[in-house]
Structure formats: C-alpha cells, structure tokens
Amino acid sequence: MSEKFEHYYVEKPSSPLKVRKVRLVLKNGHEYFFKSPSGVYAFGFVDRATRVLLEYMRVHGKTLLDLGCGYGVIGIVVKKEYPDVEVFMSDINERAVEFAKMNVKDNNVEIEVRQGDLYEPWKDMRFDQIVSNPPIVAGKRVWMKLVEEALDHLNPEGSLQLVAFHNKGGRRIRDYMKEVFGNVEELCKSGGIRVYISYKRS
C-alpha cells in the first residue's frame, strides 16, 4: 500500500510526520490552500471523491457537520462559500484534527473542530446537515454506524450526504441509507463516484 493511502482511521498515526501544501481550485475559480500531513487521508492531494462532493452537495439549513474531516477541506470550503452556515468538523485522527485547526486558521474562518470517533464529540448536538467522505477502508461496521447514528444527530428535514465509488462499497452505502432513512437520492454520477443524500423526514 502506497504511503498516500496509508490506513488513516486511527487515533494516533504511527507514520513520521511529513507535510505538503495542497492547492484546490473550484469550478467557480475560488482558490484554496491547505497543509496536508502524512497519516491523514489524503496525503498531498485533494482526492477526487472530495472534489465531487464539494461540486454536487446540496447545502441547506444553518448548521453543518463535516464528519471525518481529515485536514479540513470540505468544512473549510463550505464555510468560505456559504459564510452564513455554521460549520463543525471532527475526526478520530489526532493529527487530522491538529491540521484541520491549522487550516481553519490559515483560511481565516471560524469552525469548531473536535477530536473523537464518529458522533462521540457531538453527543448532545443536532445539525441541519451531516456530510462525509466516509472511511470505507475502516470496514462495514464504521460506515453503518455513521449512517445509523446520523438520525439522532439531524434536525427534522436535515440531510446526510455521503460520497463514494459506487462499485467499491457505494452501492451498499446507498442501499443502507435507504433502509435507515426510508429515502435516498443520487445527486450525481461522475466517473464511478456518486453523492448520496437522505433526509430525516418527520
């Protein structure tokens, strides 16, 4: 397994720390820079699934949780593009959280970042949106729990939006979102990648 795809769903990464600067340009021409550390997905680049999610996600409501935020790309871009949305980010990976906080500061936005496994840092909180590029490599138990417990952390009519390669686990995620929420929609089809959305209906 190459270094940039090292297993990252851990609390304390074991790899020696290396840092690369990452540039992201959106289709609207807005430019972002991030510090990307080793031991955090994706080291040294913004992965294609994250880019697709940013392009096609449906932003609504007043609060958004970027779950499994890595070094902070999704949450930071949402906050800059939609400044009225209150954004929260978390990750199990301590190094991810450290660099997410650094990138929040460097990009001059206000976002609360917490460390912990899935929804553990947000036990008593509810959001209008939860978005994630889920850690499929961590196994079925993790992404199933992410979907199941989203219901307890969404406001009425809130949404869960996940991105995945449809034929590499995405199809199962989509079907499970339908099972848990009673609804699911595909927001895009892009080179094998899908963005799935489910709403918490009253």
Image (cartoon, rainbow, N blue to C red):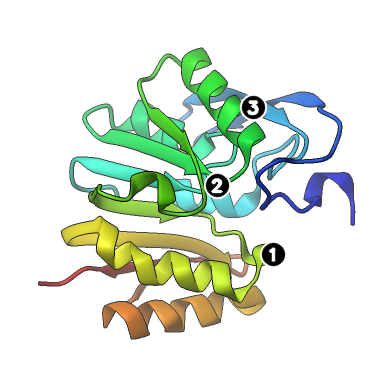
Q: Nearer the viewer, mark 2 or mark 1?
A: 1
Q: CA distance from mark 2 to mark 3?
A: 12 Å
Of pointers 2 and 1, the one earlier in the residue sequence: 2
Identify the residue under disc 3: 23
Amino acid under disc 3: Arg
On the image, the x and y values in percent for residue 63 come to 24, 41
Judge left or right: residue 96 versus residue 55.
Answer: right
Camera sees residue 197: yes
Asked if marks 2 and 1 touch (Cβ < 8 Å), the reply is no
From this view, report whether residue 138 is shown above or below residue 124. Answer: below
From this view, report whether residue 49 is shown above or below residue 147. Answer: above
Secondary structure of the residue carrying numbered label 2: helix
Of pointers 2 and 3, the one earlier in the residue sequence: 3
**From the image, which quarter does the N terminus lie in?**
bottom right
Identify the residue under disc 2: 51
From this view, report whether residue 57 is shown above or below residue 170. Answer: above
